[in-house]
Image (cartoon, rainbow, N blue to C red):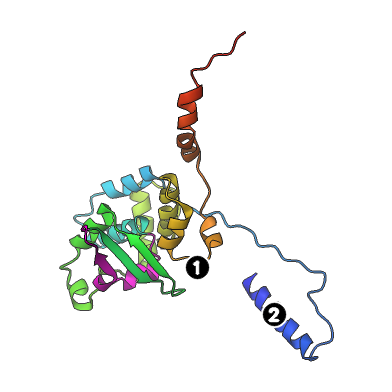
Amino acid sequence: MKYLRYLKNTIQYAIAHKWLTEDPFIGRKFHRTQAKRQFLTEAEIMEILKLDFSMMPRLELVRDTFVFCCFTGLAFCDIKSLQWSDIEKDRDGNMWIRKSREKTGELSIIPMLEVPRQIADKYVNHPVAVSTGVVLPVCSNQKMNAYLKEIADLAKITKPLTTHIARHTFASLSLNNHVPLESIQKMLGHSDIKTTQIYAKIQDQTVYEDMQTMRNRFDRLSINR
């Protein structure tokens, strides 16, 4: 659809300059199909965190990198280039990631939760991290995805684990914990909130929790028979 849109613009430019006499797009409409985005549940993330990779450092690094992205929403290219200079501490001691996205240049502003903070501290003295200034010594995307398949098997997760599913997971976790869509947009670095809305599939658990106030108020009512 993206390439067809570009082609249509080119055709219209050519017609406007009389390089073409007919528009092949007249009467044709194209509709984008919405992809189903996979994400992990909190229970599945816990299963991954419980795995002991102390004797398998390659899987431990991949697991830690993946989990870091699940709790920050960073895409693979952004976590790979994340440096300590992209992390700031405010007056209250809270740590923030402030990084322009490699893909779009949009600024992501992400408060660091305890899990990514612990992971970052874990690799602070890693030789690659020390020599390059990166937060995590991330391997290639190809290796990441290959090792993630091993991790999924060990955690008994049937979903296809990839580096990008971590970003979807962050958006889903944020929504399920009632983080406003505008805040998620800012953390993910989306220039248009419509892009963020793609992730906004409210799950049953969120709806159930949102109705708790009404349930507490009205469930005690009885109906006369």
Residue 142 showing in the rendered view: no
* Residue 43 relative to residue 223: left or right: left
> Circles 2 and 1: CB distance less than 8 Å?
no
- Sequence-first tag of 2 and 1: 2
Name the residue nearer the viewer: 139 or 72.
72
| Residue 92 belongs to magenta span | yes
Farthest-out residue, right: 21
Q: Residue at x 48, y 27 (%)?
A: 215
Name the kind of residue labelled 2 in the image. Asn
Q: Quadrant of residue 146?
A: bottom left
Name the kind of residue labelled 1 in the image. Ser
Q: Quadrant of residue 90?
A: bottom left
Rendered-image quadrant of the C terminus: top right
Q: Few, some or many C-alpha atoms within 10 Å of disc 2 (few <14, some 14-19, many ≥20)?
A: few
Q: CA distance from mark 2 to mark 1?
A: 22 Å
Residue 79 showing in the rendered view: yes
SS category of the residue bearing label 2: helix
Residue that mark 2 sits on: 9
* Residue 109 relative to residue 117: left or right: right
| Residue 126 belongs to magenta span | no
Q: Residue at x 33, y 68 (%)?
A: 98
Farthest-out residue, left: 125
Number of the label disc, if any, that sits on residue 191? 1
In the displayed structure, 215 sits above or below 50; it is above
Q: Which residues are magenta?
A: 73-93
In the displayed structure, 156 sits above or below 72; it is above
Q: Residue at x 52, y 51 (%)?
A: 200
* Residue 12 relative to residue 47: left or right: right
Question: Total of numbered circles in the picture?
Answer: 2
Percent x, y of residue 44? 37, 45
